[in-house]
Image (cartoon, rainbow, N blue to C red):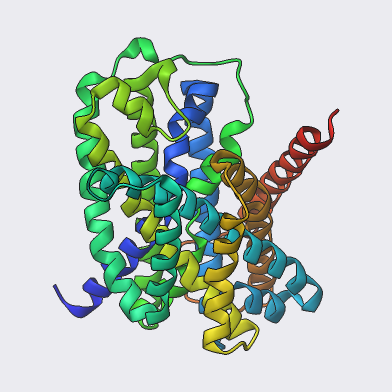
Amino acid sequence: MNARIKKLWIAVMTLVGTIIGVGIFAVPYALDRVGVTVGAVYFLLLGGIQLLQHLFYAETAIATAEKHRLVGLVERHLGKNSRHLASISSIFGFWGAMIAYILVGGVFLHTLLAGQLGGQPWHYQLAWAVLGGLVIVRGLDFVSKVEFWMTIGLLATMGMIIGLGLPHVRPANFHFVAMGDFFLPYGIILFALNGLSAIPSMEEIVGGDRNAFRLSVVYGSLIATAMTALFGFVVWGVTGRATTEDAVAGLRLALGPDITMIAALFGFLAVATSYFTTALNLRETFEYDYKIRALPAWLMAAGVPLIVFLLGAESFIGIISFTGAVFGGIVAVLIAVMYIAVAKRGLVKDMPLGLSISLARISILILSIGAGYEILTTARKLFGP
């Protein structure tokens, strides 16, 4: 394998590892609430939108000579006022995702290790928050190598779960349309397919090779979307109406205790790969876009989610649904608007994929409606009708 191909696939694995994260475990539950037809439409629609957002971000990064993360790119191409919105949405979105990774990652570690070490889930959540924070101190070179091999393990264990589950899928467990929460899958699937935090690292990994960068974005997005959908439908087909919010408890009931360790290993690898890329991107956002020194940037990136966890954050589904629909939606809208601005100024060159401005505008409309609806839904839950 020559150096170019190796870098391309490391970049692909970085994106796959980032996308296949904590959100995947809520997908079977979301599918059960709406049925096969609506669930398939969500995957086609949101999978396409997230692929577009990844490409819009990549093309904007290619067109920008300076080294920035999202906040800096938005200021460069949309102005200082837009920078504030990008700052709030991206930083709080990253922190929200990392809190979810801490909550669920610790649960999986507890399942894997409590038999030998004892302790309660919160002990493992705390330990994982500290360990994950320490890993990103080492920077991109170390994280990308660790993540590459962890993603290989992730895909292997995911394949084992799907392989073990397929013989137990029962057609009777599927229903084509359900009268549950029609909008529930929106934020969950949008969150589950979001790999935007990996894009800057991927550009650095391929070392300025534009075509390799673009190919890695397309391959990584499609592989991760297909694997997430397959996992969601297989787990739902196995567990049926007993599908749980975290997927694993339902699998244990359907397939017995032997699946628990495999599922927990898969779960932890999925959480860890996503955590590393997200935390590193946030740390570099503070460094590159806010000119904060390395140590304070690391403390802000890793410390805030730890503090929020210690203050009592618990709702896994609520965190990823709101984070995906609202913060993720706003960031994606900004990226699409930024791409339009860059394309109109003729800065997008040598682009073989033909990303039209019309596609960006359609994605903006869909994402804006979704974010607005999620905000209204959350407000009703908090304050009543």
Q: Nearer the viewer, residue 169 or 63?
A: 169
Q: Residue at x 23, y 28 (%)?
A: 257
Would residue 296 be found to the left or right of residue 103 on screen? Answer: right
Relative to 176, is 357 on the left or the right? Answer: right
Q: Quadrant of the N terminus?
A: bottom left
Residue displayed at 33% across by 63% down = 12
Counting from the top left corner in percent of width and height, residue 205 is at: 35, 77
Whether residue 255 is situated above or below residue 279 in the rendered picture? above
In the image, 56 versus 139, the foreground residue is: 139
Foreground residue, 291 or 356? 291
Task: Specify the quadrant of the image occupied by residue 137.
Answer: bottom left
The quadrant in which the C terminus is found is: top right
* Residue occupying the far top of the picture: 172
Q: Is residue 193 visible?
A: no
Is any part of residue 143 visible from this angle?
Answer: yes
Residue 319: x and y, percent?
60, 46
Question: Residue at the location (44% across, 27% down)?
Answer: 244
Residue at the spot 63% in from the left edge and 77% down from the top edge? 73
Q: How many marks?
A: 0
Relative to 280, say whether 372 is above or below: above
Q: Where 63 sits versus 278, above or below?
A: below
Q: x, y (%) of residue 47?
A: 48, 45
Residue sitting nearer the eye, 239 or 338: 239
Q: Residue furthest front?
A: 118
Name which quarter of the figure residue 72 lies in. Answer: bottom right
Q: Residue 145: x and y, percent?
A: 27, 73
